[in-house]
Amino acid sequence: MAVLFVAFVTAGLFVAQATKSAARSPVPETAIAHEQPYGITPPHGRYSVATSCSAASCHGSGVIGQIGGEYTTWIEGDPHTKAFGVLYNEVSERMIKNLGRKEPAYRDASCLKCHAVDEDKQFNGEKLDDRNHSEAVSCDACHGPSKNWIAIHYQPSWKAMSDKEKFDRYGFVPSKDLSARSLNCASCHVGARDREVNHDLIAAGHPRLSFEYTRYHFNEKYTKHWVEKLPNPDFEVRSWFVGQVASLRAAVDLLAVRAERASRQNSPWPEFSESSCYSCHQGLNPDFPRSAGADRIRPVGVPGWQVWYLSLAKLVPQASSMLTQGDTISTLSAVEKLRIAMETTNPDPAKIATLAETATAELDAILVRFQRGGFSENLSAETLTRLGGMIAESALNANRTALKDSDWDFAAQHTLALTAIYHGSGGTSAAPAIAAWKPVLLKLRTAIAFDSKSKDRYDSPKDYDPKKTYEAIRAMYDLTHNAKGDR
Amino acid sequence: MTARTLRGAWIVATAAVAMVVLARSGISQPPAEVAAKPMVVADIHNASASIAECKACHSGPDERGVRDFKNKFKSHEFIRLDESVIWEENDPHGKAFAVLDPTANPIAKIMQKSLEFGNPEYRVQNDVRCLTCHATDMKPTQKTGKLATDFARNNDVGVGCLGCHGVGAEWQVAHYKSDPTGKNEIPWRSMTPKVKEEKGQRNLRDPLAKAEMCASCHVGNPDEGKVVTHEMYAAGHPPLPPFELASFIEGQPKHWNNPSKTPYLVALAKNKPTDAYDLFQYRSETIDNYTARHIAAGAMASMQAEMKLLHADASERTKNPGHMLDFARFDCYACHHDLKIPSDRQERGYEGAPGRPPLKAWVSALPAVIAANAGLGTAFDEKWGAVKKASLAKPFGDTAEVLKASSEMIAWYKPNGKEFLYTPEATNALRGEIEKAIADKKWRGDTEAIMHLTWAYRSLRSSTKDEAKLDPLGVFLPQNVRELSKEQMDKKVPVTAGEVLADRQKKFAAFDWTKFQEEFGKLTK
């Protein structure tokens, strides 16, 4: 209750608002200006080369996977080390050709933004060159430009500092804070105000971006150079939840930039990389479209906007009540307004820019609360079963006879969410109620899997059948509701 | 018949004439006030004969009531006289309205559900946007915008006789009236196409007029309210296949004879070649290849129809600067494909920025060949280049630029809708040029363009008595139109759209450019 109380007081006008309309957001827009989450802006400062961190007595002990061996672990196998090298490969060459760019990808500023440590920031007073870039996504890219904190971050005074101060004053990204961490990941894996993977790039050959934190994090082959302080299931489940909000926040902010740009100048609008890829990119098969005859959730013939990041947005209030100590979050009404406005044939960029700003504020208010803490600990199997049940239910229509949305992204997000809970709970060694999910999750994974039997590679769900996803989700619904004894 | 309905019929007929006239070179301009009037929905009820009335005389040369025409006027040497029977028993046009029935056709059911917009009263069978093409005269009246209640005459016939031959009561009586002085001939036959058009009959003996008429539904015509929008496609309307006149005609149950098999025309061409041409646009095959002329007319008319759709859409959208054109104006398959690696598109490269869907490639591929063959290549490339550039300037087009470029393309068509003459030499040259276009790497990834060109190529080869039937290509080419059996026609919905689509879309999805080129290379050696 204390947390809730603080939140309300900070939110300022809430009480007055609530008396007017209980349905209103508990965090009014005017309150947002007072407090913003840290991590929504890029960390400031100058960069250091990775060798500044790799001293044997600091992070380069040479022992993979151990404290003190962070640099060693990273350089030996972290996928981020390959980010720059791929700019030399065939795909990158073809992309540059198709885009009609003059410089090769490894010199193209727009590629280097994400594929190397930020190219236009200088460090040691020198302009970065290929050799620096070849470090790819190195220490400072994720931990923040270290010039201002490298000399003090091992001192006791540093440990005493708040995460907010570390970020605001020194440009250090406090990655233990899941909001700041996933916002930082999202700056490349979703996009940010100065970097984007747009539809031109994707058509030229860049893979689509579809960031979901736990999918990236939970990878047995990924030897991490850190040890999570937070034990499971709390870590996996909380990072899924926080990751959803942070990723959505990044997507909405990116829309805001694009909308502002389009309202000023004749730039591509709307940006198709924000639409659900496979709502358009599916062969016109005899059973096309997949959504034919389904309940209508958006105007016919209009692709869904950010189905990937929005599929679970409606669950935020409910999930919050399950995962926090009674913290209530209202429906994301500004986000929903934005979605409706975007899912029209010709959205007005000026109007969208305003709506996106309001939606960002709505999400920021939630991130502020996350950064204050107040999450429940040692989540019980019962809570997680309820959470899983809620996720399954949200994928179904009112009569539970079909999926609510036949879009592939919608199915994939629900699958990932359920998988995060399953893994967080320990998988087969979890409580029996959750360990029993395995066969259904495997069915779900098969239902959404891309074709891997053809000789060509498919980057889209060819022959995807929403009915199979429905059957698996429905089974998950029955399983979670039986387990609770609801039926 | 009231004066009002007559006038409505006259507007339709005259506007149809105006289009034909406009499209032809150097003939007179239509009266300005007629050209300016849109002919979206005309009050044509009671102005037209029913199919039953047509059948009275077109039910077979030896039927009672028809015999006179055969015996007295030798009409069987001019037309078949069994037109109604063929149409009734085999022609899919007769099912155009029936397929809108949601209880009989699952696609109609899905479309109705998707388009109802929470309006339970909505019926695809009453939707003007559907009826403009799917029915001959079940169209709303101009005055009320509501469906007329008198359906009794032509209820449920789909695209009946008058849908193609022209509405308007005058010609329907005049065209069989015998000579008042008792001569053994029908005066109508010696009237000029212009006079016939004024009385409401379309001049379907002119390939270009015919092509424009077919294209008005099979591609679209914004002035007649015939536009399949992306919304309609997304609701479930099957994708309109590229329209290629010669091969579509081949697939049709023909209730007409090839003019070279029509004794009256052959004799006339021999004795009075000028009359044969002026009255029936007929020249002997040694002067002008019938199929080649249809291919050219079909390609040009389809392009013109698509340009008008583009122009109308751009003109609507420019009211709101920055708006995209309707997705339906672009190549469906630019977006609607699975994301495969390697990708034909990425291998081929892009003309504009990647990720900007181009216009339908088939619309320009064949006209470009035809224009080049007729010595108009440079002019065509310049006009089309501008349209293309405008359409790629932004995703889904820079509307203001598209408006300008498409109107120039439309204007260009008029003087150049000139008649192309296909002597055996010109026909051979055209065949060679189409062959080259099919093999051109630039169409890799534009399967519709290759199909459209190949359909034309096959028609041309079979018409020039080439032995090769090009059957191996059938593996790659879907069949779009087909003659239906009597049994199929007896069903309310003879072939479900699902079945038709299954063949077309499966072949389309499976199209392998490299394999196709191998096979095609063998055939052309």
Image: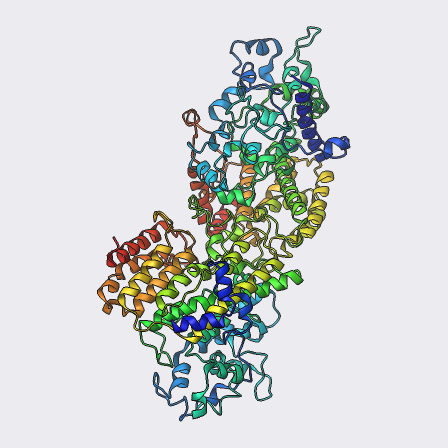
Q: Nearer the viewer, residue A127 or A393?
A: A393
The image shows residue A158, relative to residue B444, as above or below, that is below
Q: Residue at x 54, y 45 (%)?
A: B230
Q: Nearer the viewer, residue B146 or A211?
A: B146
| Horizontal and vertical percent position of residue B271 | 70, 19
Q: Residue furthest top?
A: B182
A221 left or right of A197 in image = left
Quadrant where the N terminus of chain B lies? top right
Judged left or right of residue B431, residue A250 is left
In the rendered view, how is the structure colored? rainbow
Q: Could you say which quadrant of the image residue B412 lies in?
A: top right
Give above or below for B340 relative to B87.
Answer: below
Residue at the spot x=59%, y=42% of the render?
A: B431
How many discs mark residues in the rendered view? 0
Residue A7 spot, x, y in % from top left: 45, 71
Q: Quadrant of residue A439?
A: bottom left
Q: Is residue A190 visible?
A: no
Viewer-side residue, A270 vs A324:
A324
Say whether residue A451 is visible: yes
B403, above or below A52, in the image: above
Front-most of residues B330 and A453: B330
Percent coordinates x, y for residue B73 in the rendering: 62, 11
Task: Please report the residue visible at 77 percent of the width from the left and 34 percent of the height from the top.
Answer: B26
**In this rendering, is residue A4 above or below B355?**
below
- The percent coordinates of residue A428 (x first, y second) are 24, 67
Q: Is residue B374 left or right of residue A435?
A: right
